[in-house]
Image (cartoon, coloured by chain):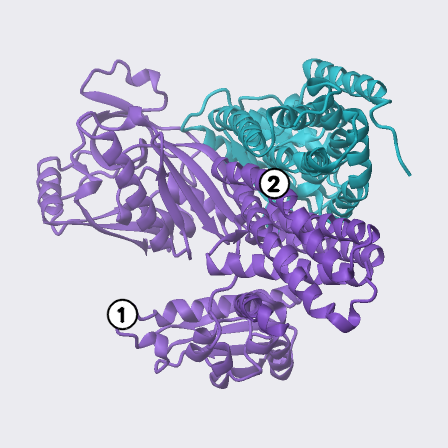
């Protein structure tokens, strides 16, 4: 008897173990045992190097995180991790979990040369901070060697759950230079945007060119969405023009011809009056000759952007400044004048500064976009969606409770209505959910809010197949068949019906997957995987369980 | 228990036709309450530090309107208080710019920073979405294409698995469900966003499930039954499968109701649409799909 089922048992057991193997690392039990931060990070910024101390007579505490440079990820032959980045990530995670526990914590004393960064925790002593961090389950309680046996991948949450930015831009083809190729301009724009985002430091960005000269950018977990959007949208076209005339209104500078243009100066800190300039239309020097840009501070301590030109740019700069001493040179960025200093002397060495009443953040942004280069065309925002992390967490919580309640309702109904068989169907549904999770992790699928809804819906729909089978078994049993014959007939007769109904649903789900984007794809994925897994759990697994249970000695009566 | 579905089928035809006509009228007169996914526009979902109400938010926008050149007026905004948000959480909607242009992004950013300055909110905004008119139109086209493709796909599959009459019965029941659910969505005023579209497409696949169970049974009974009247045979088939039809719907409904009541505001429209669809779909598979099959084949038993 058992021999006949050996093959099926092995398959079911293998799939079960596979699902457990890939699902476990995404659970909260896992985090309790092996810590929130990854094993590699735990070795790179080990718990044993943490230092806790009390400050200000116990009114606040300092937690010092230190990098262990001997850790494996820093010494890989290929792509070793950067200690600064790992340290920042760990400290940021620690800060987040502390803030989530209602404790004020901020990053202080970054000392990357020594590989240490500290967190200042308000209102706690060093001892209390140590306890808090332990409660936050940052580090593993069980040996890490166990954790490393499992896959390191956790389930990917969609932007709607994790928080983040989803942007679609259209490259404005009218703004592409005449001698430029549009497809090439789109491709270069993607590269430049990627450089800017990399320089700013955002993990896991997705930047893709799409049909119709579009660019889609997805950035998970961004803290300062406004600033990041600015970073992407700025064309960052930097040009230096000679000033011909200036006035308080644009009218006074009329007329303009092909060789001149009128632009306004950006409003400054201590200047309320608009100032307009008439400029030579042809730029003297352009941003492509730039070698480097960084933030510096002027004599008053205000942030400025320091520019360094390459050899060609420097020569050009020296020539222009040498031949126009006493005249004004306007620094124009994206068609706006930032400043128009008077040339005092011939400037050699190819250095310049952009001033213009920046905040530190604006100056940092500007330095990044200048370093990454100007976009070959301006971008039109077609769609922009920003979800804050708070809403995402609340959605997860709501989805999670709806899932538990929904599942409990369905499970109780099945257990009440179909007794023992219903309980088996319930086990099959739970197995189905486990398989969906594992498949999502394995194939790198994304769990979104509609995806969670799809998961809950799957629970309701997954029992359908078993309801159809059980009703059929009941009928056959009533018609006088023996228990085993009724079970076999029930499964055989219901099979075509189950396949037909799953195929039609799967058909619409596939269409949904190809037409939908982001969140909807997540829904289609969970529902689709659930439907396929359902055929396996409801038919193969439940049938196996029934066959194993109703052996000859128990085949007297059927609990259905 | 044995119900006589076929004898009473004209009453149910009447009910369904009434519902369909009412739905079409509703869709023609009231239409769908399109969300920004389809009509374009902007949504600001924020939690203010201080309590607020619709008038105060409108007043704030009037102030922004005074300071900036906006492409819409403060009367055009829609303010919704979020349930359970303690009068602090609001969803503010304003229309899309008439054209997609490079300046729009700047205007949206300015509105957000003005709002933050005039009426501070805690942390960051919960959600900020701006959808331009191009994307909205495209999505509408795609949605309709996806729905038509789904119906054709299902029709082809059913025609392949069953004979054409049964497939037609199932498809008529499906279109019946589609129209009535859209009518209900219009009546309740559910915001028709991309998740509601997903719910409707899912329904297309799900609603034929129940019909398939019954049609499958009819197919089987035609081969084995000695019954001479097709109407009686259909009645028998529906009665034999009634337990499964109802129970499969109940389990799905249980899951949906949990989703509807505690799944959170973001998927309420989705859950409501599916719940209505699940009920209508069960009704139509019993009272519409098989009777339509009967109307087409007549009371003669072939093969």
**Residue A18 x %, y %:** 52, 67
Q: Chain of mark 2?
A: A
For the residue carrying disc 1, how many other residues have a C-alpha within 10 Å: few (<14), some (14-19), or many (20+)? few
Q: Is residue B187 above or below residue A408?
A: above
Which residue is at 66% across, 32% downward? Answer: B60
**Residue A82 x %, y %:** 34, 69
One can see residue B122 in this view: no
Question: Label for residue A500?
Answer: 2
**Residue B141 x %, y %:** 51, 24
Q: Is residue A85 left or right of residue B187?
A: left
Q: Point out the frontmost of discs 1 and 2.
A: 2
Q: Is residue A536 left or right of residue A302?
A: right
Question: Label for residue A78?
Answer: 1
- The quarter of the picture where residue B44 lies is top right
- The quarter of the picture where residue B80 lies is top right
Q: Between marks 1 and 2, how big is the CA–CA gap?
A: 51 Å
- Nearer the observer, A503 or A379: A503
- Nearer the observer, B140 or A227: B140
Q: Which residue is farthest right?
A: B1
Q: Secondary structure at mark 1?
A: loop
Q: Is residue A305 left or right of residue A462?
A: left
Q: Colour of chain A?
A: purple
Q: Is residue A287 above or below residue B61?
A: below
- Nearer the observer, B107 or A383: A383
- Chain for colour cyan: B
- Nearer the observer, A82 or A555: A555
Q: Chain of mark 1?
A: A
Q: Quadrant of the N terminus of chain A?
A: bottom right
């Amino acid at each position: 008897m058992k021999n006949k089922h050996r093959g099926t048992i092995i398959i079911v057991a293998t799939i079960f173990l596979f699902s457990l193997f890939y699902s476990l690392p995404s659970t909260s039990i896992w985090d309790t045992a092996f810590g929130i931060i990854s094993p590699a990070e735990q070795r790179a910024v080990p718990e044993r190097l943490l230092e806790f101390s009390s400050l200000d007579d116990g009114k606040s505490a300092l937690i010092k995180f230190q990098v262990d440079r001997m850790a494996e990820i820093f010494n890989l032959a290929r792509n070793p991790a950067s200690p600064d980045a790992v340290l920042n990530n760990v400290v940021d995670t620690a800060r987040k979990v502390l803030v989530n526990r209602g404790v004020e914590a901020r990053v202080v004393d970054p000392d990357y040369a020594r590989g240490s960064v500290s967190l200042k925790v308000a209102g706690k002593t060093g001892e209390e901070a140590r306890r808090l961090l332990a409660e936050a389950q940052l580090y593993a309680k069980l040996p890490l060697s166990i954790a490393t046996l499992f896959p390191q991948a956790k389930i990917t949450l969609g932007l709607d759950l994790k928080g983040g930015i989803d942007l679609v831009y259209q490259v404005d083809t009218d703004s592409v230079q005449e001698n430029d190729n549009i497809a090439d301009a789109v491709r270069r724009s993607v590269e430049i945007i990627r450089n800017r985002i990399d320089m700013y430091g955002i993990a896991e960005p997705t930047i893709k060119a799409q049909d119709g000269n579009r660019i889609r950018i997805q950035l998970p977990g961004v803290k300062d969405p406004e600033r990041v959007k600015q970073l992407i949208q700025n064309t960052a076209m930097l040009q230096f023009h000679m000033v011909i005339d200036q006035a308080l209104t644009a009218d006074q500078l009329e007329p303009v011809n092909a060789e001149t243009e009128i632009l306004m100066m950006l409003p400054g800190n201590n200047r309320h009056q608009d100032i307009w300039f008439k400029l030579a239309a042809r730029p003297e020097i352009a941003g492509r000759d730039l070698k480097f840009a960084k933030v510096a501070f002027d004599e008053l301590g205000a942030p400025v952007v320091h520019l360094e030109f390459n050899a060609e740019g420097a020569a050009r700069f020296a020539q222009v400044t040498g031949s126009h001493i006493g005249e004004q040179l306007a620094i124009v960025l994206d068609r706006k004048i930032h400043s128009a200093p008077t040339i005092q002397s011939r400037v050699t060495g190819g250095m310049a500064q952009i001033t213009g009443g920046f905040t530190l953040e604006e100056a940092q942004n500007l330095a990044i976009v200048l370093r990454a280069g100007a976009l070959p065309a301006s971008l039109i925002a077609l769609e922009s969606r920003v979800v804050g992390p708070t809403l995402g967490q609340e959605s997860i919580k709501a989805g999670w409770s709806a899932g538990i309640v929904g599942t409990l309702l369905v499970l109780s109904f099945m257990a009440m209505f179909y007794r023992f068989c219903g309980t088996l169907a319930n086990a099959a549904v739970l197995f189905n959910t486990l398989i969906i999770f594992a498949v999502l992790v394995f194939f790198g699928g994304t769990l979104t809010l509609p995806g969670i809804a799809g998961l809950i819906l799957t629970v309701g729909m997954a029992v359908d197949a078993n309801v159809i089978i059980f009703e059929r078994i009941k009928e056959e049993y009533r018609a006088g068949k023996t228990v085993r014959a009724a079970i076999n007939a029930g499964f055989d007769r219901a099979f075509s019906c189950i396949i037909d109904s799953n195929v039609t649903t799967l058909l619409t789900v596939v269409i949904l997957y190809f037409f939908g984007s982001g969140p909807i794809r997540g829904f289609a994925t969970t529902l689709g995987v659930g439907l396929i897994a359902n055929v396996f759990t409801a038919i193969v697994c439940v049938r196996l369980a029934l066959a194993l249970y109703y052996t000859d000695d128990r085949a007297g009566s059927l609990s259905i | 228990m044995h119900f006589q579905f076929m004898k009473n089928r004209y009453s149910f035809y009447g009910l369904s036709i009434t519902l369909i006509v009412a739905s079409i009228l509703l869709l023609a007169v009231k239409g769908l309450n399109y969300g920004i996914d389809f009509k374009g526009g902007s949504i600001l979902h924020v939690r203010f530090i201080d309590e607020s109400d619709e008038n105060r938010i409108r007043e704030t926008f009037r102030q922004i309107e005074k300071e900036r050149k906006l492409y819409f007026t403060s009367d055009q905004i829609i303010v919704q208080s979020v349930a359970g948000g303690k009068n602090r959480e609001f969803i503010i909607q304003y229309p899309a710019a008439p054209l997609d242009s490079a300046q729009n992004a700047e205007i949206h950013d300015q509105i957000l920073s003005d709002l933050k300055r005039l009426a501070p909110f805690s942390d960051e905004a919960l959600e900020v979405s701006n959808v331009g008119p191009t994307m909205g139109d495209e999505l509408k086209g795609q949605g309709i294409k996806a729905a038509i493709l789904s119906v054709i796909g299902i029709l082809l599959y059913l025609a392949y698995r069953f004979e054409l009459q049964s497939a037609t019965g199932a498809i008529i029941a499906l279109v019946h469900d589609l129209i009535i659910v859209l009518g209900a969505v219009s009546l309740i005023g559910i915001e028709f966003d991309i998740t509601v579209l997903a719910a409707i497409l899912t329904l297309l696949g799900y609603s034929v499930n129940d019909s398939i169970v019954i049609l499958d049974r009819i197919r089987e009974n035609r081969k084995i039954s000695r019954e001479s009247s097709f109407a009686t045979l259909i009645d028998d088939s529906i009665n034999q499968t009634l337990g499964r039809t109802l129970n499969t719907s109940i389990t799905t409904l249980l899951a949906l109701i949990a989703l509807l009541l505690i799944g959170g505001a973001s998927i309420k429209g989705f859950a409501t649409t599916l719940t209505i669809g699940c009920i209508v779909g069960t009704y139509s598979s019993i009272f519409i799909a098989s009777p339509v099959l009967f109307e087409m084949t007549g009371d003669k038993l072939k093969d």
